[in-house]
Image (cartoon, grey):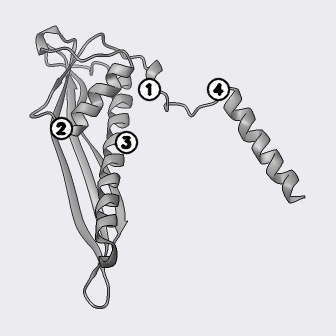
Amino acid sequence: MKTMRNFLLLLSALTLAACGFHLRGSDLQDVRFGFKSLYIKTPGETPFVAELRRTLGKSKMDPVATADQAELILEIVSENTTKQILSLSGSGRVREYQLGYRVSMRAYDLQQAEWLPPDDIRLNRILAYDDALILAKQQEEAQLYKDMRTDAVAQTVRRLMRAKPQAQE
């Protein structure tokens, strides 16, 4: 009975994989934007900006070199990481940290019309900590920050997909 259940689970997984099933929004290569060209205005080249450029390149939206050539300007206002103590043990040692990642951005065109109002992408993760595993926990922390950055890039692309000029007041 158990082997039959495992066989059916395997068969259903293979069927889903064979039919080309994928989660909506998970394939960023078939993205459609409401603009033809994009300039990324940023205070510096960070890993977030580099990954955003790579992701936009995969979706056939290579950012242009100057703002004058762009239909839309995406301004990355700031990018911050935080690390806060979440809980302590009875002996005063850290048990958990809360890791935070925040990207502030806005998008506008050459006439200064807002396409995306100033907004933040805020992500948090909890890191269980153990003094005996310092090196492993440092690597886990770096991986969590990398995953949050990847998630922020995907959220940025999804916001750009929905971007359109806002009504002027």
At label 1, counting other C-alpha atoms closer than 10 Å, the crowd grade (few under 14, some 14-19, many 20 or more) is some
Kind of residue at badge 3: Asp
Looking at the image, which residue is at 27% across and 56% down? 100
Kind of residue at badge 4: Gly
Give coordinates of residue 19: x percent, y percent: 70, 26
Whether residue 14 is visible, yes or no, is: yes
Quadrant of residue 12 in the image? top right
Residue topped by disc 2 = 46
Q: Quadrant of the N terminus?
A: bottom right
Give coordinates of residue 73: x percent, y percent: 19, 21
Above or below residue 139? Residue 87 is: below
Residue lying furthest right: 1
Give the total number of marks visible in the rendering.
4
Residue topped by disc 3 = 151
Q: Which of the two labelled residues, at mark 1 and mark 3, occupies the earlier sequence position?
A: 1
Helix, strand or loop at mark 4:
loop
Kind of residue at badge 1: Leu
Asked whether 162 or 87 is in front, the reply is: 87
The reply to whether the C-beta atoms of the residues labelled 1 and 4 are less than 8 Å apart is no
For the residues labelled 2 and 1, the Cα–Cα distance comes to: 21 Å
Q: Which of the two labelled residues, at mark 1 and mark 4, occupies the earlier sequence position?
A: 4
Q: Is residue 77 left or right of residue 19?
A: left
Quadrant of residue 24 in the image? top right
